[in-house]
Image: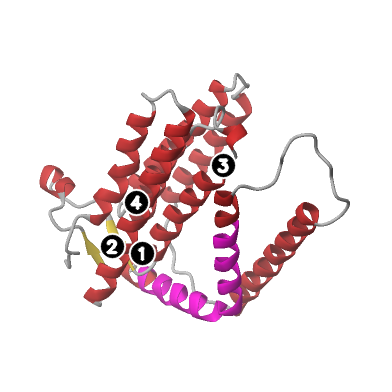
Amino acid sequence: MNEVRLPWLEFAILIPLLAAAYVWTIKSAEQKRFLSIAASGLTLAVTISAWIDFESLITYEARDHWDAIKTIFGRGEFMIDQLNAPLLSLTSLLFLMTFLATPRVKYGIYSFANSLILLSITLAIFSAKDRWLLIGLLAVQTLPLAWEIQNRRRSSRVYWIHMSVFIATLIGNELLVDSAIEFSPWVGFVVVSCMALNGIGIMRAYFRIFTGVKYESLIPIASMRSERIAILTITLILIGGGLLPQLIVNSRYKAAVKILQHRTR
Protein backbone atom coordinates (compact mmCIF):
# COMPACT_ATOMS: atom_id res chain seq x y z
CA MET A 1 0.00 0.00 0.00
CA ASN A 2 1.34 3.42 -0.98
CA GLU A 3 1.92 5.97 1.76
CA VAL A 4 1.89 9.74 1.79
CA ARG A 5 4.96 11.32 3.32
CA LEU A 6 3.35 12.46 6.58
CA PRO A 7 0.27 11.43 8.61
CA TRP A 8 -1.78 14.20 7.00
CA LEU A 9 -5.17 12.59 7.61
CA GLU A 10 -4.58 12.06 11.31
CA PHE A 11 -3.32 15.64 11.64
CA ALA A 12 -6.39 16.97 9.81
CA ILE A 13 -8.77 15.02 12.06
CA LEU A 14 -6.97 15.76 15.33
CA ILE A 15 -6.31 19.50 14.86
CA PRO A 16 -9.97 20.65 15.00
CA LEU A 17 -10.75 18.07 17.69
CA LEU A 18 -7.99 19.33 19.98
CA ALA A 19 -8.90 22.92 19.16
CA ALA A 20 -12.52 22.24 20.14
CA ALA A 21 -11.41 20.93 23.52
CA TYR A 22 -9.46 24.14 24.13
CA VAL A 23 -12.20 26.42 22.78
CA TRP A 24 -14.61 24.91 25.31
CA THR A 25 -12.43 26.28 28.14
CA ILE A 26 -12.43 29.85 26.81
CA LYS A 27 -15.07 32.38 27.81
CA SER A 28 -14.27 35.17 25.36
CA ALA A 29 -16.34 34.84 22.18
CA GLU A 30 -13.73 36.79 20.20
CA GLN A 31 -11.00 34.36 21.22
CA LYS A 32 -13.21 31.39 20.38
CA ARG A 33 -13.75 32.72 16.87
CA PHE A 34 -10.07 33.57 16.39
CA LEU A 35 -8.92 30.10 17.50
CA SER A 36 -11.59 28.43 15.36
CA ILE A 37 -10.40 30.38 12.30
CA ALA A 38 -6.78 29.47 13.09
CA ALA A 39 -7.59 25.78 13.60
CA SER A 40 -9.71 25.49 10.46
CA GLY A 41 -7.12 27.42 8.45
CA LEU A 42 -4.38 25.06 9.65
CA THR A 43 -6.62 22.09 8.85
CA LEU A 44 -7.15 23.50 5.34
CA ALA A 45 -3.37 23.78 4.88
CA VAL A 46 -2.92 20.18 6.04
CA THR A 47 -5.63 18.81 3.73
CA ILE A 48 -4.22 20.71 0.76
CA SER A 49 -0.77 19.32 1.59
CA ALA A 50 -2.27 15.83 1.75
CA TRP A 51 -3.90 16.37 -1.66
CA ILE A 52 -0.64 17.56 -3.24
CA ASP A 53 1.33 14.76 -1.60
CA PHE A 54 -1.17 12.17 -2.81
CA GLU A 55 -1.20 13.48 -6.39
CA SER A 56 2.59 13.26 -6.51
CA LEU A 57 2.38 9.50 -5.84
CA ILE A 58 0.35 8.86 -9.03
CA THR A 59 -1.70 6.11 -7.41
CA TYR A 60 -5.33 5.21 -6.72
CA GLU A 61 -5.22 5.36 -2.92
CA ALA A 62 -2.74 5.81 -0.10
CA ARG A 63 -2.60 5.74 3.66
CA ASP A 64 -0.82 7.87 6.21
CA HIS A 65 2.87 7.45 6.88
CA TRP A 66 3.55 6.56 10.53
CA ASP A 67 -0.10 5.52 10.85
CA ALA A 68 -0.75 5.47 14.62
CA ILE A 69 -4.14 3.74 14.21
CA LYS A 70 -2.59 0.91 12.21
CA THR A 71 0.20 0.59 14.77
CA ILE A 72 -2.31 0.25 17.62
CA PHE A 73 -5.11 -1.75 15.98
CA GLY A 74 -3.19 -3.57 13.27
CA ARG A 75 -5.09 -1.98 10.37
CA GLY A 76 -5.40 1.47 8.86
CA GLU A 77 -8.90 2.92 9.00
CA PHE A 78 -8.36 6.14 7.08
CA MET A 79 -7.33 6.44 3.45
CA ILE A 80 -6.92 9.18 0.88
CA ASP A 81 -7.93 8.41 -2.69
CA GLN A 82 -8.79 10.12 -5.95
CA LEU A 83 -12.36 10.79 -4.84
CA ASN A 84 -11.94 12.19 -1.33
CA ALA A 85 -8.67 14.11 -1.83
CA PRO A 86 -10.35 17.34 -3.07
CA LEU A 87 -13.37 16.87 -0.81
CA LEU A 88 -11.17 17.07 2.31
CA SER A 89 -9.84 20.48 1.27
CA LEU A 90 -13.26 21.78 0.24
CA THR A 91 -14.75 20.68 3.57
CA SER A 92 -12.04 22.49 5.51
CA LEU A 93 -12.52 25.58 3.34
CA LEU A 94 -16.28 25.55 3.93
CA PHE A 95 -15.87 25.51 7.72
CA LEU A 96 -13.21 28.24 7.53
CA MET A 97 -15.55 30.44 5.49
CA THR A 98 -18.32 29.77 8.02
CA PHE A 99 -16.14 30.97 10.89
CA LEU A 100 -15.05 34.03 8.92
CA ALA A 101 -18.60 34.96 7.93
CA THR A 102 -20.14 34.54 11.39
CA PRO A 103 -21.35 38.04 12.37
CA ARG A 104 -20.32 39.55 15.67
CA VAL A 105 -23.89 39.52 17.03
CA LYS A 106 -23.91 35.71 16.66
CA TYR A 107 -20.68 35.04 18.56
CA GLY A 108 -22.50 34.44 21.82
CA ILE A 109 -24.96 31.85 20.51
CA TYR A 110 -22.87 30.14 17.83
CA SER A 111 -21.01 27.10 19.13
CA PHE A 112 -17.53 27.24 17.64
CA ALA A 113 -16.48 24.14 19.58
CA ASN A 114 -19.31 22.03 18.16
CA SER A 115 -18.47 23.22 14.65
CA LEU A 116 -14.85 22.19 15.11
CA ILE A 117 -16.00 18.77 16.27
CA LEU A 118 -18.23 18.50 13.19
CA LEU A 119 -15.25 19.41 11.02
CA SER A 120 -13.18 16.64 12.58
CA ILE A 121 -15.96 14.06 12.20
CA THR A 122 -16.72 15.11 8.61
CA LEU A 123 -13.07 14.72 7.59
CA ALA A 124 -13.02 11.30 9.26
CA ILE A 125 -16.18 10.33 7.35
CA PHE A 126 -14.63 11.25 4.00
CA SER A 127 -11.45 9.35 4.92
CA ALA A 128 -13.04 6.24 6.43
CA LYS A 129 -12.23 2.98 4.67
CA ASP A 130 -14.45 0.53 6.55
CA ARG A 131 -18.19 0.70 5.87
CA TRP A 132 -19.24 0.08 9.46
CA LEU A 133 -16.81 2.72 10.67
CA LEU A 134 -18.43 5.12 8.21
CA ILE A 135 -21.89 4.33 9.58
CA GLY A 136 -20.62 4.78 13.13
CA LEU A 137 -19.11 8.17 12.28
CA LEU A 138 -22.34 9.28 10.62
CA ALA A 139 -24.17 8.31 13.80
CA VAL A 140 -21.68 10.21 15.98
CA GLN A 141 -22.06 13.24 13.71
CA THR A 142 -25.62 13.69 14.99
CA LEU A 143 -24.42 14.38 18.55
CA PRO A 144 -22.95 17.90 18.19
CA LEU A 145 -26.14 19.12 16.55
CA ALA A 146 -28.19 17.57 19.33
CA TRP A 147 -26.04 19.34 21.92
CA GLU A 148 -26.59 22.61 20.07
CA ILE A 149 -30.35 22.14 20.19
CA GLN A 150 -30.26 21.32 23.91
CA ASN A 151 -28.03 24.33 24.68
CA ARG A 152 -30.63 26.57 23.06
CA ARG A 153 -33.31 24.95 25.23
CA ARG A 154 -35.28 23.63 22.28
CA SER A 155 -37.04 20.31 22.00
CA SER A 156 -34.86 17.73 20.25
CA ARG A 157 -37.56 15.05 19.94
CA VAL A 158 -38.20 15.57 16.22
CA TYR A 159 -34.47 15.74 15.56
CA TRP A 160 -33.81 12.43 17.32
CA ILE A 161 -36.69 10.74 15.49
CA HIS A 162 -35.33 11.93 12.17
CA MET A 163 -31.74 10.91 13.00
CA SER A 164 -32.86 7.51 14.27
CA VAL A 165 -34.62 6.83 10.99
CA PHE A 166 -31.54 8.08 9.14
CA ILE A 167 -29.17 5.74 11.01
CA ALA A 168 -31.57 2.80 10.71
CA THR A 169 -31.78 3.42 6.96
CA LEU A 170 -28.00 3.43 6.67
CA ILE A 171 -27.69 0.14 8.54
CA GLY A 172 -30.52 -1.44 6.58
CA ASN A 173 -28.96 -0.39 3.30
CA GLU A 174 -25.59 -1.84 4.34
CA LEU A 175 -27.19 -5.18 5.15
CA LEU A 176 -28.57 -5.45 1.62
CA VAL A 177 -26.57 -7.31 -0.97
CA ASP A 178 -24.34 -4.94 -2.94
CA SER A 179 -24.99 -4.95 -6.64
CA ALA A 180 -23.03 -3.46 -9.47
CA ILE A 181 -24.36 -0.15 -10.73
CA GLU A 182 -23.91 0.36 -14.43
CA PHE A 183 -23.37 3.82 -15.74
CA SER A 184 -26.46 5.20 -17.48
CA PRO A 185 -27.11 8.34 -19.53
CA TRP A 186 -29.97 9.06 -17.14
CA VAL A 187 -27.39 9.68 -14.42
CA GLY A 188 -25.93 12.52 -16.49
CA PHE A 189 -29.43 13.93 -17.02
CA VAL A 190 -30.07 13.91 -13.27
CA VAL A 191 -26.72 15.62 -12.57
CA VAL A 192 -27.43 18.37 -15.11
CA SER A 193 -30.94 18.83 -13.71
CA CYS A 194 -29.58 19.14 -10.17
CA MET A 195 -27.00 21.71 -11.32
CA ALA A 196 -29.75 23.70 -13.04
CA LEU A 197 -31.93 23.68 -9.92
CA ASN A 198 -28.90 24.64 -7.83
CA GLY A 199 -28.22 27.60 -10.14
CA ILE A 200 -31.85 28.71 -9.91
CA GLY A 201 -31.67 28.50 -6.13
CA ILE A 202 -28.48 30.59 -6.03
CA MET A 203 -29.93 33.29 -8.30
CA ARG A 204 -33.16 33.38 -6.28
CA ALA A 205 -31.19 33.78 -3.06
CA TYR A 206 -29.09 36.54 -4.65
CA PHE A 207 -32.12 38.57 -5.77
CA ARG A 208 -33.85 38.13 -2.41
CA ILE A 209 -30.77 39.28 -0.47
CA PHE A 210 -29.14 41.94 -2.64
CA THR A 211 -31.96 43.46 -4.72
CA GLY A 212 -35.36 44.97 -4.07
CA VAL A 213 -36.36 47.87 -1.85
CA LYS A 214 -33.53 49.30 0.19
CA TYR A 215 -34.03 48.67 3.90
CA GLU A 216 -33.07 51.43 6.30
CA SER A 217 -31.96 50.16 9.70
CA LEU A 218 -31.29 52.01 12.94
CA ILE A 219 -28.20 49.88 13.51
CA PRO A 220 -25.31 49.24 11.06
CA ILE A 221 -25.94 46.01 9.13
CA ALA A 222 -23.25 46.34 6.46
CA SER A 223 -21.24 43.19 5.89
CA MET A 224 -17.85 42.96 7.55
CA ARG A 225 -14.64 42.45 5.63
CA SER A 226 -14.43 38.80 6.75
CA GLU A 227 -17.99 38.21 5.51
CA ARG A 228 -17.17 39.75 2.13
CA ILE A 229 -14.06 37.57 1.84
CA ALA A 230 -16.07 34.43 2.61
CA ILE A 231 -18.84 35.31 0.13
CA LEU A 232 -16.32 36.23 -2.58
CA THR A 233 -14.39 32.99 -2.10
CA ILE A 234 -17.50 30.81 -2.34
CA THR A 235 -18.73 32.83 -5.34
CA LEU A 236 -15.44 32.30 -7.18
CA ILE A 237 -15.62 28.55 -6.51
CA LEU A 238 -19.20 28.42 -7.81
CA ILE A 239 -18.34 30.44 -10.91
CA GLY A 240 -15.20 28.40 -11.58
CA GLY A 241 -17.12 25.15 -11.22
CA GLY A 242 -19.89 26.49 -13.46
CA LEU A 243 -17.52 27.63 -16.23
CA LEU A 244 -15.55 24.37 -16.31
CA PRO A 245 -17.94 21.72 -14.98
CA GLN A 246 -16.73 18.99 -17.33
CA LEU A 247 -13.27 18.87 -15.77
CA ILE A 248 -14.71 18.40 -12.30
CA VAL A 249 -17.46 15.96 -13.28
CA ASN A 250 -15.13 13.90 -15.47
CA SER A 251 -12.45 13.55 -12.79
CA ARG A 252 -14.99 12.65 -10.08
CA TYR A 253 -16.67 10.13 -12.41
CA LYS A 254 -13.37 8.38 -13.13
CA ALA A 255 -12.61 8.26 -9.41
CA ALA A 256 -16.07 6.82 -8.66
CA VAL A 257 -15.63 4.16 -11.35
CA LYS A 258 -12.32 3.08 -9.82
CA ILE A 259 -13.94 2.82 -6.40
CA LEU A 260 -16.73 0.61 -7.81
CA GLN A 261 -14.15 -1.58 -9.55
CA HIS A 262 -12.18 -1.81 -6.31
CA ARG A 263 -15.29 -2.83 -4.32
CA THR A 264 -16.24 -5.58 -6.79
CA ARG A 265 -12.87 -7.31 -6.59
Give residue 138's quadrant in the image.
Answer: top left
Per the model, the C-alpha gap separating discs 2 and 1 is 8 Å
Which mark lies nearer to you, 1 or 4? 4
Q: Position of residue 34 (x, y in %)?
A: 42, 39
Q: Is residue 68 above or below residue 2?
A: above
Q: Was residue 239 drawn as part of the magenta stretch in this picture?
A: yes
Which residue appears at 45% of the width and 59% of the height?
90
Whether the residues at callouts 2 and 1 have beta carbons within 8 Å, the answer is yes
Closer to the camera in the image, 12 or 169? 12
Which residue appears at 34% of the width and 51% of the height?
43
Closer to the camera in the image, 28 or 205? 28
According to the picture, the residue beneath numbered tag 2 turns out to be 50
- Of pointers 4 and 3, the one earlier in the residue sequence: 4
Region of the chain picked out in magenta, as a range: 231-259
Whether the residues at callouts 1 and 4 have beta carbons within 8 Å, the answer is no
According to the picture, the residue beneath numbered tag 4 turns out to be 43
According to the picture, the residue beneath numbered tag 3 turns out to be 102
According to the picture, the residue beneath numbered tag 1 turns out to be 85
- Of pointers 3 and 1, the one earlier in the residue sequence: 1
Per the model, the C-alpha gap separating discs 4 and 2 is 10 Å
What residue type is disc 2 on? Ala
Q: Was residue 195 drawn as part of the magenta stretch in this picture?
A: no
Q: Is residue 159 above or below residue 264?
A: above
Closer to the camera in the image, 248 or 218? 218
Query: Where's the N terminus, which quadrant?
Result: bottom left
What residue type is disc 3 on? Thr
Which mark lies nearer to you, 4 or 2? 4
Question: Does the rendering let one see residue 135?
Answer: no
Label 1 CA crowd tier, 10 Å (few <14, some 14–19, many 20+): many
